[in-house]
Image: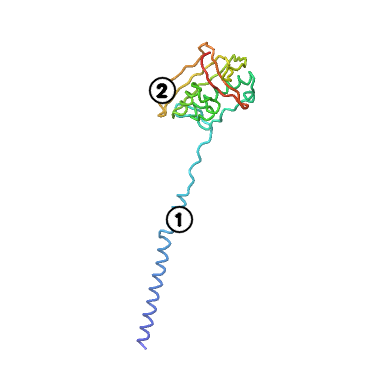
Amino acid sequence: MANRRRTLRSALSTLALAGTLGLTACGAGTSGPEAQGTPSAAASGTASPAPDARPTPASSTGPARNLPKPELPAAAKENTEAGFKAFTQYWFDTATYSLETGDSGPLEAISDSGCKVCNGYLADSRAGGWTVGPRWLSTGFSSDMKLDPAGQAVGYFMLEEGTSRWFDADGKLTKERSGGNNGKPKAIYASYTNGAWTARQLGQA
């Protein structure tokens, strides 16, 4: 009888020990890698801040960002002297946009591939640098709308140029221009095809 009691106590002790180990194992499992991974996953899924979409003008610290592209005036779609005049001002507005933002697409779209002045500004806008200004204003525009053998009309105008600062791709100021008007008339050669003007050349009259 004594042996049976000792055997029973031994069995109960073994069960109690097994139960204790089992609880300990469960407790350890809740603090293991699976449980610890939950906060890490949440942290890694944190969304990064959205980029600033506000229009930012060009400055000494960087090019312009998120500026609206120049809008082609309705008049500039017409094959008239008034349309040619509106297109000329639009071309200069687009040149400024390209230089300040580095987005050469709008200027390229209205410039002939053989236009030297156009290509010069396109190269500047693609070089990685930027400008602050210049703003150009064409005044006193006139054209007889007669086409030369190449199918181009020529317009004459005076040009007011605003001040400007030019920065390279490293942000170094490379030149400053005071702007103004040299009093000499300018000329633009352009063609009108499929309802749109294209600049073919610009320069001194």
Gap between marks 2 and 1, in whole Å? 53 Å
Q: Do labels 2 and 1 touch, CB within 8 Å?
A: no
Q: Residue at x 57, y 27 (%)?
A: 70
| Percent x, y of residue 89 | 57, 21
Structural crowding at the residue carrying mark 2, measured as other residues with C-alpha within 10 Å and reported as few (<14), some (14–19) or many (≥20): few
71 or 5, which lies in front?
71
7 vs 202, nearest the viewer: 202
Q: Residue furthest front?
A: 149
Residue 40: percent from the left, percent from the top?
44, 52
Q: Please name the residue shown 35% across and 86% down the image.
A: 3
Q: What residue would you read off at disc 2? A: 174
Q: Could you tell me the amino acid type at mark 1?
A: Thr
Q: Please name which of the two marks, 2 or 1, marks the residue nearer to the observer.
A: 2
Residue type at mark 2: give it: Thr
Q: Is residue 155 left or right of residue 164?
A: right
Give the residue pinned by disc 1: 38
Query: In this view of the protein, which residue sits in the foreground, 10 or 116?
Result: 116
Dot 2 falls on a residue whose secondary structure is: strand
